[in-house]
Image: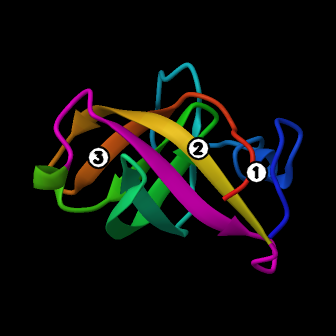
Amino acid sequence: MKQTTSKSPCNSLVNKTTTKGHRDNRKNKRTVKEINVWLYNNEMLVALARTKNIAEKGFFIKTNVLLFPKNSKLEVVFDIGNKKERCRLPATVVHRSLEGIGVMVKKHIVGV
């Protein structure tokens, strides 16, 4: 698998952000985009999940919230393009709801 960098195609998922149908005062606008993600904690796969939306600084992920307390650290991993590249992003859980978790992405890191 190809390695990712800060100028990787991972950025293309989050660089065109909009909101749909409501006023949103967030600093970083969200894009409704559902993708499959793998959630890792301490290099161990914890959950397979699906995003609800993506923003420049993070994701909202539909998953079992009991697995992820607020402020917990995890890695969000997902395929891009035709699955020849994979992004692995360190993240922190910043909020939880009945539907899932909101995570803030720290930075892109190399390879999976």
Q: Are marks 2 and 1 in contact (CB under 8 Å)?
A: yes
Magenta span contains residue 51: no
Q: In the drawing, does residue 11 fall left or right of residue 78?
A: right
Q: Are marks 3 and 2 in contact (CB under 8 Å)?
A: no
Residue 20 in sight from this viewpoint: no
> Picture coordinates of residue 27 (x, y %)?
56, 19
Q: Which mark is residue 10?
A: 1
Q: In this view, which residue lies farthest toward the front?
A: 43
Residue displayed at 55% across by 69% down: 35
Q: Secondary structure at mark 2?
A: strand
Q: Nearer the viewer, mark 3 or mark 2?
A: 2
Q: In this view, which residue lies farthest toward the right?
A: 7
Q: Nearer the viewer, mark 2 or mark 1?
A: 2
> Picture coordinates of residue 109 (x, y %)?
69, 39
Which residue does the numbered mark 2 point to in the structure image? 89
Q: Residues within 10 Å of mark 3 (few under 14, many from 20)?
A: many
Gap in angstroms between the C-alphas marked 3 and 2: 15 Å
The amino acid at mark 1 is: Cys
- Tell me where the magenta segment starts and ends, as one range: 68-84
User: Which of the two discs, 1 and 3, labels the residue nearer the N terminus?
Assistant: 1
Q: Which mark is residue 101?
A: 3
Residue 81 in sight from this viewpoint: yes
Gap in angstroms between the C-alphas marked 1 and 3: 20 Å
